Amino acid sequence: MGLLNNAFPDNALTRTVDEAIGWGRKSSVWPMTFGIACCAIEMMAVYAATFDLDRFGAGVPRATPRQSDLIIVPGTVNAKMAVRVKRLYDQMAEPRYVIAMGACVCGGGPYVKWGYNTVKGVHKIIPVDIFVPGCPPRPEALIDGILKLREKIGRNDVFRRRQEAKEQMSAAYEA
Amino acid sequence: MNETKLHSRLREACPSGVGDLDTSAKDPFVVVEAAALVEAMVFLRDDPACAMEMLHLVTATEREAAIEVAYHLCSYTHHHSLTLKVVCPRPEGADQEWSPSVPSVASVYPSADWHEREQYDLLGVRFDGHPDPRRILLPEEWIGHPLRKQYVYPTSSGDIPLELDATPIYERPEGWTDPEHAPRAAGTPLVQPPNAPSARPHAGGKAPPPKPKGEGDEPATKPKPKPKGDGGAAPKGEGGDDMAAKIAAIKAAKAKKKKEGDG
Ligand code: SF4
């Protein structure tokens, strides 16, 4: 959408179109098949029948970063893995979203003090949208994270001019 | 067969280089000369009465006077096990770069291949005759062996920052260069409250030298990243001193209790 991105003033039409696009995006967040450490086990539980992430349109783990919108980073990112995580993130197409799952990727977790090899938070490597703390987080916590991400995606400005929308929002907030 | 019988049998087969059996340990072990290791392993594997089919673990320990490499063997056929140990004494005046060398047993037990690579990676034990002597866990270009007592913690690995207060790599300004970090002394944690020396007990090794005061972990020029997620940041400023005092008080109370309990 390159050229048309944020190219239009904020009016009823563009807002409706944006909302429609946002609804479409947030209802089909396809995560990448990706797991690093113990948290990945809990993430698999979220995909499986009991918790069933498909209820939120995110139950189709893609096998390649080029098809996925969301990368859940579940587990300890160490120096060797960080290079791979960054490369996978770089391969994803915009718009792309990142969920940091677990204490390890939120800021080092158990390895924060003596981990000679651990990256203290995956936000040192790639920009993170949602942090889900816990060691490991309960599946409900990850589902909550995905719901929060859905809200965030739904609020995105696609065609509307971003600055105006921002000002409006802050004005509404102050009023 | 129990360990005593295994030991006497092994000693009969290769009299030179096989030491005594230490039964005081929970896992009785035999100290073997490095030169006799491969011969002893081949005997234990091929002798029908021993029939050690599996080498399930190779580990190493750094002590003040030596680095010990332990080989844990067991037999499916006879349900017995034996531990062999090779002791590599630290030469006089050896610096921290010193790394012992032990003959590789990967040709006897293929399972030793990766275990030996791990011991090389983490403790710097060289295995002569190993088919593929590379690091196994850490990146190839890693410097040092992290489980050594005198290991200096790195602040970054290539482009990847390893500190809690590092600037995220996508927020680095143009022309960013790695800020000069003073290398940390062994056993210093990556992030610690200001002026609080490390309280980590040093098993076997020398106590870590106390950190010079006033030398913070973060250089003044480095921009501070916005705290995006709560990563369990260490207590900073005045809180740190309070914390240290509290921790000391708790430790003292515990020690007192233990004394009373013993007496
Ligand atoms: S946060 Fe806990 S459960 Fe998750 S990867 Fe780290 S250590 Fe494992």
Image (cartoon, coloured by chain):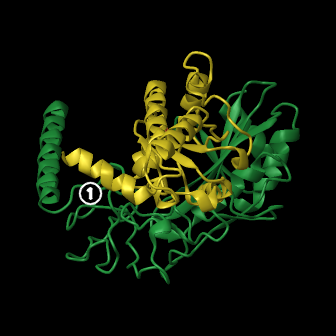
Chain colours: A yellow, B green
Report the side of B231 relative to B66 (left or right): left
Tell me where residue B30 appears, x and y as whole percent. Answer: 64, 46
Residue A30 showing in the rendered view? yes
Give the residue type that dot 1 points to. Answer: Ala
* A46 over A77 or under it: above or below: above
Report the side of A173 relative to B223 (left or right): left
Residue behind label 1 places its C-beta within 8 angstroms of ligand 1: no
- Total marks in image: 1
Report the side of A59 relative to A155 (left or right): right
The part of the image, by quadrant, that contains residue A87 is bottom right
**Mark 1 closeness class: few <14, some 14–19, many ≥20 residues within 10 Å:** some
The part of the image, by quadrant, that contains residue A72 is top right
Nearer to me, B89 or B205? B205
Tell me where residue B221 appears, x and y as whole percent. Answer: 32, 81
Residue B151 showing in the rendered view? no
Query: Could you tell me which quadrant the C terminus of chain A lies in?
Result: top left
Report the side of B227 relative to B148 (left or right): left
* A44 over B220 or under it: above or below: above
- What residue lies at 80% left-to-right and 54% top-to-bottom? B38
Mark 1 chain: B
Nearer to me, A3 or A132? A3
Tell me where residue B203 appears, x and y as whole percent. Answer: 39, 54
Q: Which residue is mark 1?
A: B199
The part of the image, by quadrant, that contains residue A114 is bottom left
* A168 over B10 or under it: above or below: below
- What residue lies at 77% left-to-right and 52% top-to-bottom? B113
Nearer to me, B60 or B158? B158
Name, please, the residue furthest toward the top: A50
- Check disc 1 and report its element: helix, strand or loop: loop
